[in-house]
Image (cartoon, rainbow, N blue to C red):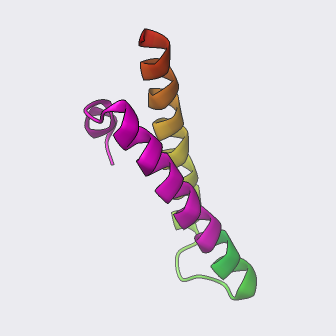
Amino acid sequence: MKSEEIKGFSLEELREKVKSEQEALRKLKFAHQVSAIENPMRIKEARKLVARLKTQLTAKELQK
């Protein structure tokens, strides 16, 4: 997901997206602990996506 796409989300959409992506990241980490996942770089990408979403969420909250 690109930064331009993230900037288009509303405040509520960002909150929902952060929650769902954090859950996906948690499941991905757990799956990797149990048995090695095919592409471990997905964990890094998911972590970066969560960070981007949180950054944009904070920026929008500060604007209000």
Q: Residue furthest bottom?
A: 35
Task: Tell me the residue at 69%/76% (across/down).
Answer: 30
Task: Tell me the residue at 64%/81% (across/down).
Answer: 31
* Dominant secondary structure of the residues highlighted in magenta in the image: helix
Reply above or below: 32 against 1: below
The quarter holding residue 29 reads bottom right
Q: Is residue 15 magenta?
A: yes
Nearer to me, 61 or 31: 61
Report whether residue 35 is seen: yes
Report whether residue 45 is seen: no
Q: Where residue 4 sits in the image (x, y, percent)?
A: 27, 33
The C terminus, quarter of image: top left
Q: Which residues are magenta?
A: 1-28
Q: Residue furthest right?
A: 33
Reply above or below: 63 against 44: above
Nearer to me, 21 or 52: 21
Q: Where residue 42 sits in the image (x, y, percent)?
A: 52, 65
Mark count? 0
16 to the left or right of 35: left
Nearer to me, 27 or 13: 13
Q: Is residue 14 magenta?
A: yes
Task: Tell me the residue at 49%/56% (across/down).
Answer: 21
Q: Where residue 34 sits in the image (x, y, percent)?
A: 73, 86
Task: Tell me the residue at 53%/83% (across/down).
Answer: 38
17 to the left or right of 28: left
